[in-house]
Amino acid sequence: MNHGTEILDAKQYFDELEGVVANLPHGTINQIADELVRANEAGRMVYLFGNGGSASLASHFACDLGKGTAYCNGGKRFRALAFTDNIPTLTAWANDSSYEDIFAEQLKNFVEPQDIAFAISGSGNSKNVLNALRVARESGATTIGVTGFEGGEMKSLCDICVVVPSDNMQIIEDLHLSMAHSIFRIVSSRMACRTMTASVAK
C-alpha cells in the first residue's frame, strides 16, 4: 500500500492535512447526512463495515449514531449495526467460506430495500467491502462509501461516495473520522430540531 509522500516532521504532516481538508467535497458529505436522516425517519437500518482502521471507524460511527442520537429530545432511535463487532461470526465466515465474504454474508441475513450499506475503505479496493456493496445493491439498499486515493472500484458501487483527495493513508483515515463526526453532528442537530418542532406543534 502506498503511504504517500515521505513525512519528515510534524509540520509537514499537518500542512499536508490542511491542504487536503481544503479540497473535501462538502456537498457530498452533506448528502450522506441527508440519507442517514431519511433512513432514521423511515426506520431503516444502517450497516457499517471496513478493515483495520476502517473497522474501528465502522464501530465508532455505529456507536455515535446509535447512542449519540438517543439524546435528541426523545427522537426516533437510530438503527445502526457495525459488522466489524461480532468476532465469532467474522471468524466463522472467514474460516468456512473466505475472508472476502465476511461482510457480504452478514449482510444477507439482514439487508432490506432502502436500508443503508455504509462502506469504509482507504483504498476503495478491499474485496470484502466490494462484495458487501454488491449484495446491498442487489437487495435494493442505498450504498454509501468513504474512501481515498482515486476511489478504487468502490466508487462505482456507491450511490454516494466521498473520496478523500490524498494518497496518504493516515491522512485519509484522519479525515474519514472527521467526516464521520461532522455527519453525526449534522444528523443529531437535525433530529433534535425536528423533535423540538414536533413537540411545539402539539
Image (cartoon, rainbow, N blue to C red):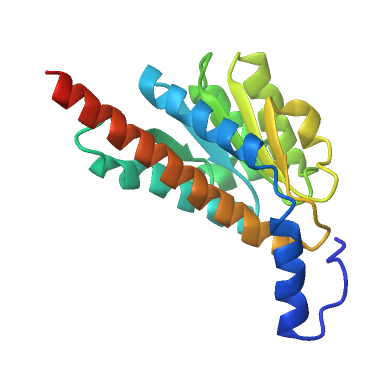
Q: How many marks?
A: 0
Q: Is residue 59 found left or right of 175 in the rendered image?
A: left
Front-most of residues 171 and 142: 171
Q: Position of residue 144 (x, y in %)?
A: 63, 32
> Which of the 4 image quadrants contains residue 127?
top right
The structure residue drawn at horizontal position 83% and vertical position 58%, both measured from the top left corner, is 167
Q: Nearer the viewer, residue 150 or 195?
A: 195
Q: What residue sits 70% from the left and 35% below the top?
A: 161
Res 188 quadrant in image? top left
What residue sits 85% from the left and 60% below the top? 1
**111 above or below 129?**
above
Please give left or right for residue 140 compared with residue 197 in the image: right
Residue drawn at point x = 11 percent, y = 18 percent: 202
Task: Give how far across and how far down residue 31 sits, in percent.
Answer: 58, 31
- Kindly tell me whether residue 47 is visible in this rendering: yes
State which quadrant residue 96 falls in: top right
Q: Nearer the viewer, residue 110 or 197?
A: 197
Expressed as whole percent of the image width and height from the top left, the position of residue 112 reads 51, 16
**Residue 8 locus on image (x, y percent):** 82, 85
Q: In this view of the protein, can residue 98 be seen by the observer?
A: no
Farthest residue, direction bottom: 9
| Residue lying furthest left | 202
Question: In the drawing, does residue 6 fall left or right of residue 169?
Answer: right
